[in-house]
Amino acid sequence: MKLSGAQIVVQFLKDQGVDYVFGYPGGAVLHIYDALFGQEDIKHVLVRHEQGAVHAADGYARSTGKCGVALVTSGPGATNAVTGIATAYMDSIPMVVITGQVATAYIGSDAFQEVDAVGITRPCVKHNFLVKNLKDLPGTLRKAFHIATTGRPGPVVVDIPKDITDPTIKIDYTYPTDVSMRSYNPVVKGHWGQIKKALELILDAKRPMLYTGGGVVLSNSSAELTEFTRALGYPITQTLMGLGTYPATDKQFVGMLGMHGTYEANMAMHECDVLIAIGARFDDRVTGKLSSFCPAAKIVHIDIDPSSISKNVRVDIPIVGDVREVLREMLQMLKAESRRPDAGALQLWWQQIAEWRGRNCLAFDRKSQLIKPQAVIETLYKVTRGEAFVTSDVGQHQMWAAQYYKFDQPRRWINSGGLGTMGFGLPAAIGVQLANPDATVACVTGEGSIQMCIQELSTAMQYRTPVKIINLNNRYLGMVRQWQEFFYEGRYSMSYVDALPDFVKLAEAYGHVGMRVEKPADLEAAMTEAFALKDRVVFVDIITDQTENVYPMIAAGKGHHEMHLAPERELA
Amino acid sequence: MTRRIISLLLENESGALSRVAGLFSARGYNIESLTVAPTEDASLSRMTIVTRGSAEVLEQIIKQLNKLVDVVKVTDLSEGPHIERELAMVKLRAVGESREEYKRLTDIFRGHIVDVTDTTYTVELTGTGEKIDAFIDAAGEKGILEVVRTGACGISRSERSLTV
């Protein structure tokens, strides 16, 4: 089949099984957009800003496990995409971003809309390519998808100069089924001896703790993790990125850990004698002060990325491999093993945990005259029966969503954990909704975050993606305000958001339904009404208590045992 | 903080060098020197990096280098017996008595004078970084007009080889 470069891009995406491309046209990609025209296999979603394209592709990828695809033009198209690419990179999301580039003859001449996209994105991609010859195009695209989706996933940028997609120059095209790279061969299977050693240590534990992260989501090993955890009967905590891979409603789940983790999770981390880290990377928001991290514990760490192992915390038994492969092997070994966990020790350990749980660290004032943000998330959970896909932006609302929405399934909780990108939630929700057309999708956000990508309300209209926006409106950049209250003696520098738009009217201006809720008594009815509007975007603007803080909290640089609970929950 | 000499093979692609250099700057690793050139296989470049860091940092450097898609193989030469060489060219002000003195000094260090004018010598010198430091010290600040060094390159002793 003789095809032009532009036709190759489109045909390749079809052959690769891509159904959605999120993008925005411009000069350098016009040939590609012309090749997209009139075909129906690939559905192109026109966003309103390239950052939104990449976040939408990201939401699509996180909710399905498939590779997200974005298409943007050169120069500002590429630079606008960078925040989205960095977001995907920090959370290891499989994604291919195709950026247009000025024609090869113009590269380096400061041409119109020229930017060194490969150079700019290099620190925030798993890999990137500049296609210099048309004949390299199919193989490069194939490599891009291969690299993005295997090993520790991540975004890959393919920068294509305009002359490469020239419609008048055609070459023979066949889909390159084979891809082999001598320099890229991720380890999948764990080392048998290490797994054996790890299992022995795990069975020796008196105060064990499972600490699991986004790697469990990425490797689709929720079922294996659940079986393993139940077989052992050990307590399990999860990172912000790992939520949902073990049912949050199960009694063995002790809540999220880290800076805003539960009292029981963080105390159990501090006191455990064997820590089993699975697909987690010991991020600073999780570990707190490194010198007082799990002081009594021997640590097992399963991760596909060798550079994650012993990066921040020295581990005793590292296992490099795909989490699912390793867990399957470990489960088999456990079944063949006659030894079982120490029931007596475990009973004492669970007693201790029950005592910590008794502090009831997530309790909040339910009689308040003001709407408590925690109550909003609880109501959301109730109204959606815990089955919604929940995307979020970044800040207090993100933490409350993570704490109070009990995710029982993986890929339902979609947030920017690593980079912490405000503006992520709405475009991500659009991507999630397109990938899961019959699902309930909620975007939990705040009046600060939502305005960072508010233009995507227009995209949501064009593609009829009926996401529900739950706006926790406290007229403050809440997390900034919280830190200023705690650490800057209440000097609320630039954290008060004045001159806010009327979000109800704004939603209506975009053609959506807008609702405002101001009283606790109206919350559930309003939310029920919003979710009953199955085919509409509903913007629910909820006026919440301005002074509410996220608790528990470990201040930056403190240890797990140095948590602050809400003032009324601190022991006298 | 120990000194390490890391040798790697990487795809001879445009941008490969900046991936390695970028990794070091982005993660705050030290580079004392970095040399790179193609090998007998035109598709591969060989790079030698001299760095300093704690054992933990060095372990991370090796892992992070291995993670780069363009990097084919990485080895820490300092783990075993190896040979290390650096080339330097030193331009000296050579007038009066110092003309004879620098000639002698060059012989002692087994260097070669590769360019001569009425007032200058240019000395070519090969050896370990230490030897070149010693020559520069001995030549003295006043006499030196210009120094250019390649940075170290290294190879392991015996059968052990860094190949694909």
Image: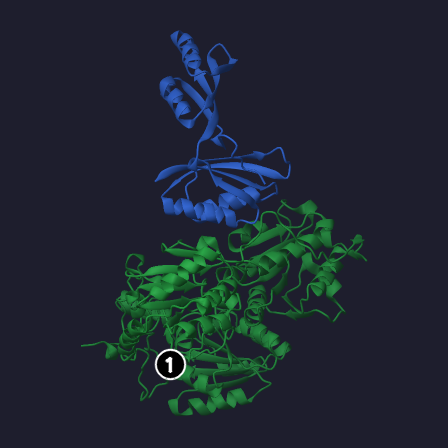
Chain colours: A green, B blue
Q: Is residue A496 visible?
A: no
Q: Is residue B13 visible?
A: yes
Furthest residue in direction front, as rendered: A338
User: Quick check: A511 above or below B68?
Assistant: below
Quadrant location, the C terminus of chain A? bottom left
Horizontal relation, residue A2 to residue A120: left or right: right
Furthest residue in direction left, as rendered: A572
Q: Which of A511/A328 is in front? A: A328
- On the image, the x and y values in percent for residue A141 come to 67, 56
Packing grade of label 1 (10 A; few <14, some 14-19, many >=20) is many
Task: Give the letter of the chain under mark 1.
Answer: A
Q: Which of B54/A339 is in front? A: A339
Q: At 58% from the left edge and 64% from the top edge, which residue is drawn?
A: A50
- On the image, the x and y values in percent for residue A398 come to 42, 73
Q: Which of A312/A230 is in front? A: A230
Q: Considering the numbered disc 1 on the image, is that residue within a helix, a strand or a loop?
A: helix
Identify the residue under disc 1. A374
Quadrant location, the N terminus of chain A? bottom right
- On the image, the x and y values in percent for residue A378 come to 41, 84
Q: Which of A369/A420 is in front? A: A420
Q: Amino acid at mark 1?
A: Gln
User: Quick check: A95 above or below B71?
Assistant: below
